[in-house]
Image (cartoon, rainbow, N blue to C red):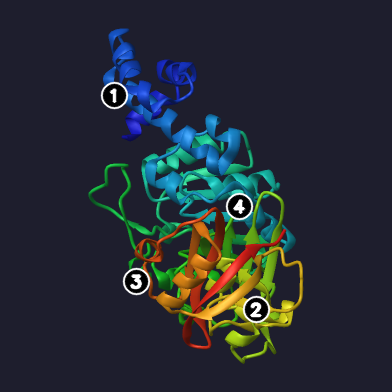
Amino acid sequence: MTPALLARLVSGEGAALLASLPPYDEAAAFTLADRLRAEGFDADLVAAALTQSRLRARGERKFGTAAHGMLFTVDGLEQATRRQIAQLHARRFSASGTRQVFDLGCGVGADARAFAVAGLRVTAVDADEVTAGVAEFNLRSWAHAKVRHGLAEHVSVPTAQAARTIGVWLDPARRTPGVSDLQGRTRRTFRLDQLAPSWDLVRELGAATAAAGVKLSPSFPHAAIPLGTQAQWTSYDGEVLECVLWWNDAAWDTGRSAVVVSDQFAHEVLERDATGANPEPARLDRLHGFLYEADRAVIRAGLSGALVRRVDGAELDTGIGIVTSPRDVVVPWAKKYAVSDAIPFNLKALRSWIRDHRIGRLTIKKKGASVDPVQLRRQLRLKGDNEATILVTRVGGAQAVLMLAPVR
């Protein structure tokens, strides 16, 4: 979409066309497009309106019903912060004494909207002209939120006394310009030296601002965490979505941390929660009891030890994020199972167990094991009326099979 086409879409005939569209239906999209063109609407405008209708329907997953009053780009929606997580970013800035946030690399304005809702003054900037225009549309309801088209490198952030209530939020571009895929998305990059703005500028702005946050890939390496910052991995419903580096007043607990978010709660796990955890791995002959599987954000943050301490247990194998314990403990950021049996991984022995228990329906989970679940299922020759769940994993460095039952 060009800036000129965006301008047509948000005013006059284009805005009326977009507002008149029915709920998006992929199967009916081509027929609807033909009808609208036959009614005299410009083909480019029809295509742009239908694209927005499709993206709005997809955007409900992140923004709920608010998506139907927003505009998106394909890459912008892909990278946009989910509403519940953006609210956490805004609360941290507010609680850190921030009154104005410079959102550099604002994308479609997902975080900027949360900042504005929290009452923070917002200056949102994006290097792409169309994306900046989309963000301006999405922030139109808040007079204290302004959008500019420009480079983060050219933004003058207040310093000295004026900077005491200033926050900076950076979301460096992690997609490289070039050919798009069939969904319109460009290639994702995971390299720090390919960020825009540059990694050097990110660190410079973070260190120089009273409160700063930088949204990065969940694959951000632990070794690259700048001294004195808080690196926070965040998941939503079990999917790790981001790693945010927090600087200065916004770095409440330096080191690694994880935030586990759902529609019902947000739980934080800190590096100090893992301090003093039992380093000894579990033993196969002591697994009868309960099994706890840490949320993926906790594992990405390297904080499996927090789960070990919480349940007073032992990790099955170093860094695997699954802990055994005889104790029945409520851990909101971990799944819990009862362990009914545990054996070394051996196809013949596992097949015998399946036969003896008349298992005809089997759920195969794996973690840290070199097995193909599809192939294993074929080899087990399932037959019977019962069902079971097994976990193929490592226990003390050796592959094992654990028979599980969920615990509510």
Mark sitting on residue 193: 3
Q: Which residue is mark 4?
A: 86
Upstream in the sequence, badge 2 or badge 4? 4
Q: Tell me where residue 303 sits by quadrant.
A: bottom right
Mark sitting on residue 324: 2
Frontmost residue, 319 versus 31: 319
Q: Amino acid at mark 1?
A: Asp
Residue 359: x, y in percent?
Answer: 52, 60
User: Of the residues tagged 2 and 4, which is closer to the observer?
Assistant: 2
Residue 366: x, y in percent?
Answer: 47, 69
Q: Tell me where residue 97 sits by quadrant.
A: bottom right
Is 307 situated above or below 26? Answer: below
Q: Amino acid at mark 2?
A: Thr
As measured in the structure, the alpha-carbon distance from the residue carrying label 2 to the one carrying label 4 is 34 Å
User: Of the residues tagged 2 and 1, which is closer to the observer?
Assistant: 2
Q: Amino acid at mark 3?
A: Asp
Is 185 situated above or below 334? Answer: above
Residue 69: x, y in percent?
Answer: 55, 30
Q: Are marks 3 and 2 in contact (CB under 8 Å)?
A: no
Q: Secondary structure at mark 2?
A: strand
Is 226 situated above or below 29? Answer: below
As measured in the structure, the alpha-carbon distance from the residue carrying label 1 to the one carrying label 3 is 37 Å
Q: Quadrant of the C terminus?
A: bottom right
Upstream in the sequence, badge 2 or badge 1? 1
Upstream in the sequence, badge 4 or badge 3? 4
Q: Are marks 1 and 3 in contact (CB under 8 Å)?
A: no
As measured in the structure, the alpha-carbon distance from the residue carrying label 2 to the one carrying label 1 is 59 Å
Q: Which residue is mark 1?
A: 44
